Amino acid sequence: MDYLNLDVALAQLLAYFVSEKGYTIVSVQQDRDDLWLIQPKNRSFPILRLCRESREELQSKQSYLRQVNRVICDLIHRESKVIVVNVDQRAESFEDEEIRQVALLRNDDLAFARAFPDARGQLHEVSDARAELARLSRRMEETHRRPHVWRTLAALFPRKTLALFVLVIALSLAFQHVGVSAGFSRDAILDAHALWRLFSCSFALETPWALVQLPALFMVSLSAENLLPRGFAASLLSGAYAGGICLLLGGAESAAAMPTALIAAFLGAVLCELCLTHFWRFPLMRTHAARLCLWGIIAMMVPGAELAAFAGGAGAGALCSWICHLRERRDPRFVHTLAASLLLAAGMFVIAWF
């Protein structure tokens, strides 16, 4: 991109997001001068488009904006509306089902102002536009030289999801090597006190049918990693525990090891998060949720999948999502909800044991 041919206000804003906020410029093949930025770590504004356009020009590009936004969302594994940051003096902030425009000069989008309090201050008059563009160009080039490209790509890498897959495969091979079953067994848990089977039955693959569940596990785990970065491990462990306990409470004698409870836990956590954050009202989010539900149904239809494990995992995942939501908002109900959840988990164990 030729920075020296940019609008000065757009260049000032671009330099701010790239140099200070860690955004990366995305080149769009249809229009290489169109300014799209990505920052996968920003949950509220992962994708931005900078422009100086009237509302009529924006509306005429709706189809193009939707297409580009969809491609970028798939690339960074995020769901977001088309977020347009407009520096035009006549622009007004608005939001509909597909587009959210931030009129930067009016500074009336409170969420954007809280996320980027210094953005409005980046726009200022200059006497020498050419010199200003050259300065901003050097600033962005220095930023590009500091972190290598692979670091930006590393931010898109689903580390937790891949770590989970490595763990599941490693445990499956280990149990097979030593000749010990990882599946659920009521007699082994209650009589031999093999409590680890409450978890191992969700973290190993004991039948060929369990392999069919891996694509579903990957999709829901990837979504949970993106939407619940801090609640990923809690949803994982609580879902496995609840799945095993519900098998005990449901009277199951034995069940093959397969990740049914993990899939349900991530699915429940993601759906709960979409509802709590009101993302559910966005068509893109509803489509994403429908795809995940379809994967959940496929996983549940696999021979050997236990409904009790699925129900327990889904409930635990949703509860974890709610607790994380309360914690992030510093809601006073957080401590009470967490304590009640721990008592519930302990009570279920006592009831199942006796």
Image (tube, helix red, strand yellow):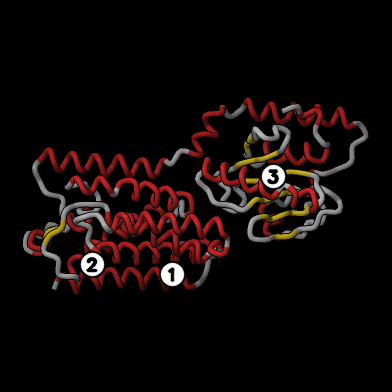
Q: Residue type at mark 2?
A: Cys
Provide residue 253's location: percent of width, then percent of height: 11, 64
Q: Is residue 52 left or right of residue 173?
A: right
Q: Is residue 249 left or right of residue 333?
A: left
Depth check: give the residue in front, 56 or 235: 56
**Residue bearing the label numbered 1:** 335
**Residue bearing the label numbered 2:** 246
Decide which of tag 2 and tag 3 comes sooner along the chain. 3
Q: Are marks 2 and 3 in contact (CB under 8 Å)?
A: no
**Residue bearing the label numbered 3:** 49
Q: Residue at x 64, y 28 (%)?
A: 144
Residue 12 in the image: above or below residue 220: above
Q: Nearer the viewer, mark 2 or mark 1?
A: 2
Provide residue 292's location: percent of width, then percent of height: 41, 55
Provide residue 12's location: percent of width, then percent of height: 78, 38
Q: Nearer the viewer, mark 3 or mark 1?
A: 3
Q: Quadrant of the C terminus?
A: bottom left
Depth check: give the residue in front, 67 or 330: 67
Q: Residues within 10 Å of mark 2 (few under 14, many from 20)?
A: many
